[in-house]
Image: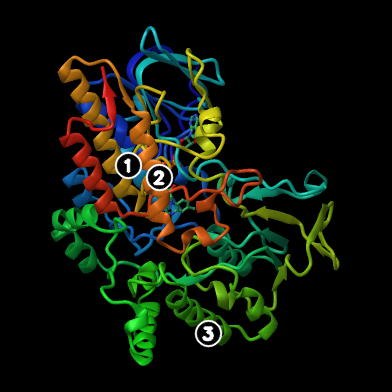
Amino acid sequence: MTISQPSASASGTFDVVVVGAGFSGLYLLHRLRRAGFSAVVLEAADDVGGTWYWNRYPGARCDVPSVEYSFSFDDSLEQEWNWTERYAAQPEILKYLEHVAERFDLKRDIRFNTRVEAATYDVDAERWTVQAENGSTLQARFVAMATGCLSTSSIPNLPGLSDFAGPVLHTGRWPHEPQDFTGKRVAVIGTGSSAIQAIPVIAQQAAHLTVFQRTPNFSLPAGNHPLKPEEVEQVKATYPERREYLRRSRSGATYEYATVPALATPEEVRRAEFERRWKIGGANFMHAYTDLVKVREANELAAQFVRDKIAATIRDPETARKLMPTSYPIGTKRICLDTDYYPTYNRDNVSLIDLLEEPLQTITANGVRTSRQEYPADVLICATGFDAMTGSLLAMDIGTTDGQSLRKVWAEGPRNYLGLMVAGFPNLFTVTGPGSPSVLSNMVTSIEQHVDWIVDCVDHLRSKGLATIEASQDAQDAWVDHVREVANTTLYPQAASWYMGANIPGKPRMFLPYIGGVGAYRGKCEEVVAAGYKGFVLK
Ligand code: FAD
């Protein structure tokens, strides 16, 4: 991989300043350029990739099939790129994004090592000023935050962490140098998606791996495998129809969406169906019945199926018991996909510590001490997730010269219209913002939809000779209510999940993404445009 040179501080005036150079920022830049706008991307990292630049931990891979977790906007890109696995690993996805940046000559308009700290809208001049930590100050009519939903790592405030004598790593800020755990005692804190991907790989190398678990997660077998050339060819031959289907689908990915409820299905049929989906692998399991995330009793049938699988896999009944989630419905915390996660606990060099039974007291120089004992470690890995959806937006001081502040407006939780714009902040867009399908979907499908909507909107303003667009307060209030109401028809709000902001101390609890479905959401965005940007004020 080529590492770009650090950018010096930048200045200038643009039509659009984009913040972030992951999937969202790259596609935004491409589309803005094609539409004839001047645009620049500011990126904190020293290269492109976003999620796939930062999350280099062993085992990192996507959990939406690679052939769908990719851009659809360019036919020849789609036809020429060859994914090698059902779920591509991080190096391959990063290589893909590097390729996209090179293919469309994007890097010349990206300023790397440029972390934005503030953005201020001058209500008189109708312009944004964007300031970065390196002294860059840019002016633009529009700002698009492509800062990511899972891009601000949550570093736990563990007592004694700074006393630890060895390296402390975070899965979301993984070093670029290869990490060799041979002969080392490794401690992993956390058992979310990243940990579940990393643990089986690290266990193969480490002398001993101790996993510290607070809440067990439900994990399904990924069923990852190398893609055969004929599989890839078959997908390529049908890409246009497939992509169109994804855009109108529930989750932006090809799943076998159920048509019948579990509670109306005879037990043997249901078990056989769960078994069939379990064998195929992937998140398809959760789409087996229409009532799985709506009715607790139905959900419990799927949950018990997975618990039975855990019991059947793990030799030590005590370890199996600790790994079985019982305190929330399956699927209401992000469902994890794994390769050999549960069997890893049968290895002699792996132990599981349940922090609910023996709370973590402190990190020491030599390891982790719980209420029962000290567990020695040479390396500490925090797999403690992200301040999801709002973390990166609120890390910046976003405001206006008439006294609006995003941090104040969102103090009780994010409020916006369609997940795209916030009332009081004209010409500021958020890609896959809270209140949009985002993390509940194949995010590349959702990113493309948002980017297209945003660029079409800016183009519309230009063609009508208009200067500003802003969400109206009424439309915003109605949207926030709608997002909450739809969430409340499901079991999702019952879990203390990062979807609810529950993993971050002090974060307001509300269901952050929109669960109405990718296709339905797209339809609403289209209706708004067709009705002359209904709910927005254009001037
Ligand atoms: P990101 O990729 O997060 O990029 C945002 C960029 O903005 C980052 O490079 C960041 O450095 C930059 N940035 C943030 N704040 C600032 C600032 N103030 N100044 C300058 N730059 C800033 N989604 C799926 O749909 N399917 C999957 O299988 C999947 N797997 C995932 C696996 C992992 C380990 C993680 C962490 C996430 C996964 N996701 C997955 C979600 C993933 O984040 C999105 O799919 C997608 O990569 C988001 O792209 P993005 O460009 O919107 O944001």
Q: Are marks 3 and 2 in contact (CB under 8 Å)?
A: no
Query: Can you identify the residue that label 2 sits on?
Result: 481
Marks 1 and 2, the one that precedes in the sequence: 1
> Which amino acid, mark 1?
His
C-alpha separation, residue under disc 3 versus residue under disc 2: 38 Å
Q: Residue furthest top?
A: 124
Q: Residue furthest bottom?
A: 268
C-alpha separation, residue under disc 1 versus residue under disc 2: 41 Å
In the displayed structure, 308 sits above or below 173; it is below
In this rendering, does residue 221 appear at all? yes
Q: Are marks 1 and 2 in contact (CB under 8 Å)?
A: no
Ligand 1 is found in which quarter of the picture? top left
Q: Which of 127/448 is in front?
A: 127
Query: Can you identify the residue that label 3 sits on?
Result: 308
Query: Can you identify the residue that label 1 sits on?
Result: 99
The residue carrying mark 2 has its beta carbon less than 8 Å from ligand 1: no
Residue at image coords 34%, 90%: 266
C-alpha separation, residue under disc 1 versus residue under disc 3: 43 Å
Residue 431 placement (x, y as % from top left): 37, 37
